[in-house]
Image (tube, rainbow, N blue to C red):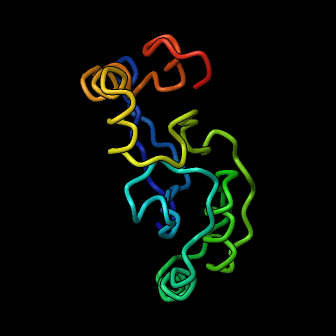
């Protein structure tokens, strides 16, 4: 059916077909940064110098996209530009705001904030409610 999907809808025993265009969603992670390499919570850091060539090497493997969105971070901008894609910034794709932990390594934070890192690691609701961290770990500026 060339890019279309037939969907059968059953309502009160009757069936009808609806043609809908298929949508492909491809998610591409940004290239490696100093934070991802060292295991630190990210800031708005750039891609590592060697990543530009690595990202270019996958450009030909991506299918053509009708619309491309990216987060607002420098690393996502550099990745998209290196892939020669035109993308709109979508704030809902922004990385988590790590507050005072941004740019710091896990061991460093663990040494300074043992109780807070323990809460972060053990609270199953925290992952889905990250933006409410100040409520969870009693900090004044997260």
From what the image shows, is residue 34 above or below residue 91? below
Q: Nearer the viewer, residue 6 or 94?
A: 94
Residue sitting at the far left: 122
Residue at 40% x, 65% y is 37
User: Residue 25's spot in the image, x, y percent?
Assistant: 50, 57
Residue at 53% x, 76% y is 63
Residue sitting at the far front: 112
User: Residue 44's spot in the image, x, y percent?
Assistant: 64, 54
User: Residue 50's spot in the image, x, y percent?
Assistant: 51, 85
Residue at 43% x, 13% y is 136
Q: Nearer the viewer, residue 65 or 77?
A: 77
Horizontal side, residue 115 vs residue 42: left or right: left
Residue 141 sits in quarter: top right
Residue 115 sits in quarter: top left
Instruction: Give the total of numbered labels.
Output: 0
Q: Nearer the viewer, residue 73 or 40?
A: 40
From what the image shows, is residue 14 above or below residue 18? above
Horizontal side, residue 74 vs residue 101: left or right: right
User: Residue 89's spot in the image, x, y percent?
Assistant: 73, 52
Residue at 39% x, 32% y is 112
From what the image shows, is residue 73 above or below residue 101? below
- The quadrant of the image that shows the C terminus is top right
């Amino acid at each position: 059916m060339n890019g279309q999907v037939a969907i059968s809808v059953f309502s009160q025993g009757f069936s009808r077909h609806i043609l809908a265009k298929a949508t492909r969603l491809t998610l591409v992670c940004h290239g490696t940064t100093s934070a991802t390499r060292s295991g630190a919570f990210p800031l708005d850091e750039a891609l590592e110098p060697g990543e530009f060539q690595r990202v270019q090497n996958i450009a030909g493997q991506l299918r053509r996209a009708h619309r491309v969105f990216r987060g607002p971070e420098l690393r996502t901008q550099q990745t998209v530009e290196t892939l020669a894609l035109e993308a709109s910034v979508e704030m809902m794709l922004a990385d988590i705001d790590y507050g005072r932990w941004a740019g710091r390594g896990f061991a460093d934070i663990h040494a300074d904030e043992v109780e807070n890192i323990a809460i972060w690691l053990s609270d199953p609701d925290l992952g889905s409610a990250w933006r409410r961290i100040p409520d969870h770990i009693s900090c004044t500026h997260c």
